Image (cartoon, rainbow, N blue to C red):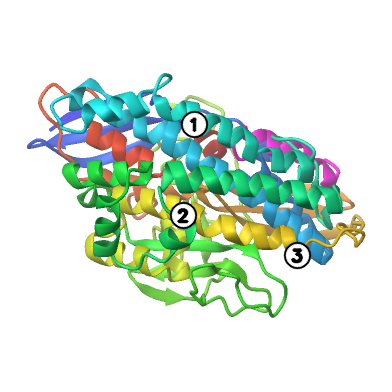
């Protein structure tokens, strides 16, 4: 058996190393290392609770809104405060805008450039792919980057700026939209819809959202010249549906709260299974190999058996700590990462757009996973399908805004309280847990989406989601960074700075 280390990974937010044990030309086992410790959870201690809204967005420059949303939700839960309807709608729009931008940034800037590499030059599709997606110079960048910049203007109107806005608050949003701004927001979404319809899908968003079966998707791709269809043809040639299967257990905290008692405004006609008093557009729950279950927050735990952290037993994040080793890292020979090992009911779960759509019951995604499991293909399709599903709903949310009505309720600091904020970032389930005593934060814990997906082994020696997904991948003699490994890693869209916060 030989040992292969890949790292640092390029086109990944933050620092990442992957250690592979290779036998008989295949990955026999993997260890995923987050080599950077940052300590944001420690920065929160003894602070005024509202300081969280200033500090935690700085965890990340690409998903800062998601961090703000989780902190605001935790503060709201600690005080029992509910946002007015305008605040709910605006908060959904702000988070959805960032998630859309993240999905497409991943596709165009992080993922597709791998297929423009010289290693694929003998493939029939390589020349066109290189011209379209080559890093820094591909034709797609001249279309995508201006469209993304225009989309992010929505955050200018609703959040004042991006990243690191302070508009998201426990009681709603501070930036009230006017009637004129509603028209401008709809115009921005109309233009972005045009980019998606002409460039990404070469079809209407409604037609994309109506796809139900893998064979429908394959037939659809043969008739299209958009960028999703280009990817699907590459995926078929490289058999990406056979790569990257992890546990096939999926977790979603539920994305985009609806009004209490309201039915989800799904553009694809799916009635989701979220039966809580305040349902989500994309349901909250877990999916165990195709079987749907209700979500129970008490089932979350974090294990540090293989992390450079102190601790003996797995803890729920409401009671957990983050205590880095103060001596040599070799003092804990079982450890190989700064990342904890989150588990749900003691099991490894995957999170992200694929998990969201699995839990939400989206038929195409469920059919893809039923056929070949959670794969590179399924993750990318779920991400872009979510883009097609979200934009029509965002248009409805803008229409529902009522200028002149409140967007925010005043938050009052409790002397003693605790709360959790569970939201869905682009990359999946993001949770913040805080405790307040004598008006100050005395405990703050964060589990980011990539913490779930890129976790190490736990005390039972069960590998994390990515570690499982890498097993069995081919490695040719002399390869230093197999492309199959890179495709699988990037299919999860890792954000390592959030992982180690």
Q: Could you tell me which residue is drawn at 71 percent across and 46 percent down?
A: 68
Q: Could you tell me which residue is drawn at 75 percent across and 38 percent down?
A: 156
Residue 448 lies in the magenta stretch: no
Residue 272 or residue 154, whichever sits in front: 154
**Residue marked by disc 3:** 400
Disc 2 and disc 1: Cα gap in Å? 24 Å
CA neighbours of label 2 inside 10 A, class few (<14), some (14 to 19), many (20+): many
| Residue 467, image x, y percentages | 31, 45
Q: Nearer the viewer, mark 2 or mark 3?
A: 3
Disc 1 and disc 3: Cα gap in Å? 30 Å
As drawn, is 223 to the left or to the right of 175? left
Which badge, 2 or 3, comes first in the chain's sequence?
2
Q: Which secondary structure, mark 3?
A: helix
As drawn, the label of residue 143 is 1
Location of the N terminus (image quadrant):
top left
Q: Magenta residues?
A: 43-63
Q: Nearer the viewer, mark 1 or mark 3?
A: 1
Residue 192 or residue 486, whichever sits in front: 192
As drawn, the label of residue 353 is 2
Is residue 200 in sight in this rendering? yes
Residue 53 lies in the magenta stretch: yes
**What is the tally of numbered marks visible in this picture?**
3
Q: Could you tell me which residue is drawn at 22 percent across and 45 percent down?
A: 471
């Amino acid at each position: 058996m030989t040992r292969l280390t890949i790292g640092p990974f390029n086109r990944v937010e933050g620092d990442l190393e992957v250690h592979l044990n290779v036998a008989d030309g295949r990955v026999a086992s993997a260890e995923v290392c987050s080599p950077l410790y940052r300590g944001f959870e420690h920065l929160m201690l003894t602070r005024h609770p509202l300081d969280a809204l200033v500090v935690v967005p700085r965890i990340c420059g690409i998903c800062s809104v998601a961090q703000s949303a989780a902190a605001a939700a935790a503060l709201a839960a600690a005080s029992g405060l509910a946002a007015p309807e305008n605040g709910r709608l605006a908060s959904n729009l702000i988070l959805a805008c960032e998630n859309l931008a993240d999905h497409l940034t991943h596709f165009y800037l992080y993922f597709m450039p791998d297929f423009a590499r010289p290693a694929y030059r003998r493939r029939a599709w390589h020349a066109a792919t290189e011209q379209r997606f080559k890093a820094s110079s591909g034709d797609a960048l001249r279309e995508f980057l201006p469209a993304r910049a225009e989309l992010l203007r929505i955050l200018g109107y609703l959040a004042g700026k991006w990243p690191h806005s302070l508009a998201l608050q426990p009681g709603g949003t501070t930036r009230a939209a006017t009637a004129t701004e509603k028209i401008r927001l709809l115009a921005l979404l109309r233009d972005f819809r045009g980019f998606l319809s002409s460039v990404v899908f070469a079809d209407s968003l409604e037609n994309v959202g109506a796809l139900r079966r893998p064979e429908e998707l394959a037939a659809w791709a043969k008739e299209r010249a958009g960028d999703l269809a280009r990817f699907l043809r590459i995926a078929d040639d490289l058999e990406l549906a056979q790569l990257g299967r992890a546990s096939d257990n999926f977790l979603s905290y539920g994305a985009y709260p609806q009004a209490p008692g309201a039915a989800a405004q799904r553009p694809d006609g799916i009635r989701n299974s979220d039966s809580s008093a305040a349902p989500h557009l994309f349901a909250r729950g877990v999916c165990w190999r195709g079987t749907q279950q209700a979500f129970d927050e008490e089932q979350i735990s974090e294990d540090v058996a293989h992390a450079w952290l102190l601790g003996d037993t797995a803890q729920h994040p409401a009671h957990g700590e983050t205590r880095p080793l103060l001596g040599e890292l070799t003092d804990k020979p079982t450890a190989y990462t700064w990342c904890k090992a989150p588990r749900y009911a003691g099991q490894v779960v995957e999170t992200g757009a694929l998990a969201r759509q699995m839990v939400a019951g989206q038929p195409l995604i469920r059919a893809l996973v039923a056929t070949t499991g959670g794969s590179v293909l399924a993750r990318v399709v779920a991400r872009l399908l979510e883009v097609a599903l979200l934009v029509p709903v965002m248009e409805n949310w803008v229409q529902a805004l009522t200028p002149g009505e409140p967007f925010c309720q005043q938050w009052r600091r409790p002397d003693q309280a605790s709360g959790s904020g569970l939201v869905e970032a682009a990359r999946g389930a993001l949770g913040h847990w805080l405790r307040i005593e004598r008006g100050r934060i005395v405990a703050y814990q964060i589990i980011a989406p990539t913490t779930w997906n890129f976790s190490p082994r736990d005390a039972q020696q069960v590998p994390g989601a990515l570690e499982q997904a890498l097993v069995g991948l081919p490695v040719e003699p002399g390869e230093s960074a197999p492309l199959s490994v890179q495709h699988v890693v990037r299919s999860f869209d890792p954000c390592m700075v959030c992982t180690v916060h």
